[in-house]
Structures are given as C-alpha cells and as structure tokens.
Amino acid sequence: MVGALLVTLLVILAFVGFRACNRTNLSVSPDHVDYLAQIRDAQQAGARLTYPASLPSGWYATQMTFDQGPPPELVLSMLTPDDQYVGFVQSPKTPAELLARYVDAQATAGPPAHPPGPGGQPGSIHQSVPSWDVWTDAGGDTALVARHGNDSLMVFGTATRSQLEQLASSLTTAQVKG
C-alpha cells in the first residue's frame, strides 16, 4: 500500500517537473472590444445612451455591458496606454450608490471638475453637464460624477484626473453612425 502511494507521488512529481521545464510563459492581454458597435446595437433597440464619442489616442475598451434593466445601466471598461484603468457608468442609481459600488463608500470630495467642451460635437452633453463632482479614495482612485437627466454618470479609475476629464468631455448622446 505504501509502495503504491510512493509510486503515485513520484509520478505526480515527475509530471510537475516536466511541465515546469517545458512551460512557456504565456502572454495574456486584455480583449479589445468595439464598444461603438455595441452602443449602436443598443440604440437601434431603443436605448438612450450616453457614451464616449471616441477614446483618447492609445486607449482601448476592454469590456462593455448594457443591462436593459429595469433599471437600465451601461458600464464601459477601458485601459490607457500605460495600463491605467478607466471606467464609465451611466445608471439611474444615485451618485452615492455608484461611488460605493465602483470606487469607495468612504470616498472624499474634492474641488469640482470643469472638463473642456468638445468643440461643437453633435450630441455633446457638455452644455447640460458643465461641472462634475470629484471624489477620491485612499487607494488612488478618482471619480468624476454628475447627473444627466434621470441618470448618474461616473468616469472613474486609476488614471489621472486630467485623463478622466478628457474622457468626460467626449461624452455624447448622438446616434452612432454605421
């Protein structure tokens, strides 16, 4: 009985050793998703969405979820060229609920942000949302939060405040072409 146990143990150790010697380091990179195509599909189904008209140079979307609800909610995840996370949420939930879920329930308020306007971009929300509340947490996250109609909008993540403001300035409700 002990002999069979030792043989089994030796076989397992030999297999683990063999895999360790022949393993190549796998490179795992996040998916790149076409969020605009998903936005267009949701709009064609009747959804009224706020979304980034385009992403800053080098940024890419890694995931987008749209829950038709009730209540409906859009969540978009992105990465910057230096792998900093940025998220965007459109939700009928209160800003406090979004902060507690995505940033920190104990986030600290900072001076408001006034992102620059997009220069006549059709559907831009800049006129109706010229100012955003700013929140930070002890872990280095920053969130820009504003109300737009019946929804809360939040741009948040580990990116710099200026990068978050850049994304907030690109938000639109225009129909996606194509």
Image (cartoon, helix red, strand yellow):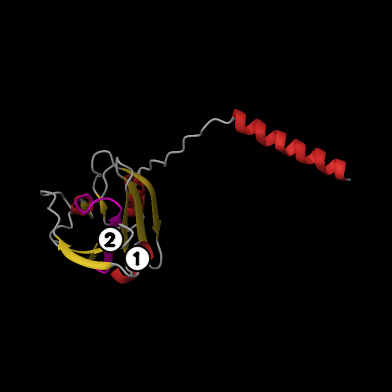
User: Percent position (x, y) of residue 141?
Assistant: 30, 58
Name the secondary structure under disc 2: strand
User: Percent position (x, y) of residue 159?
Assistant: 27, 50
- Using the image as rendered, state which of residue 127 and residue 79 is in the foreground: 79
Quadrant for the N terminus in the image: top right
Can residue 33 be seen in this snapshot? Answer: yes
Q: Residue at x 76, y 37 (%)?
A: 10
Q: Residue at x 30, y 41 (%)?
A: 82
Query: Which image quarter: residue 89?
Result: bottom left
Residue flagged by tag 1: what amino acid is it?
Asp
Residue flagged by tag 2: what amino acid is it?
Met
Residue 37 on the magenta span? no
Residue 152 on the magenta span? yes
Highlighted range, magenta = 149-163
Q: Residue at x 16, y 50 (%)?
A: 122
Q: Residue at x 86, y 45 (%)?
A: 2
The local crowd at label 1, few if under 14, some if 14 to 19, many if 20 or more residues have their Cα within 10 Å, is many
Q: Which residue is mark 1?
A: 104
Q: Are marks 1 and 2 in contact (CB under 8 Å)?
A: no
Q: CA distance from mark 1 to mark 2?
A: 13 Å
- Using the image as rendered, state which of residue 76 and residue 44 is in the foreground: 76
- Using the image as rendered, state which of residue 94 and residue 106 is in the foreground: 106
Q: Which residue is mark 2?
A: 154
Query: Which image quarter: residue 48?
Result: bottom left
- Using the image as rendered, state which of residue 8 and residue 162 is in the foreground: 8
User: Percent position (x, y) of residue 150?
Assistant: 26, 69
Quadrant for the C terminus in the image: top left
Going from the N terminus, do you reach mark 1 or mark 2 first? 1
Can residue 94 be seen in this snapshot? Answer: no
User: Percent position (x, y) of residue 109?
Assistant: 23, 68
Name the secondary structure under disc 1: loop
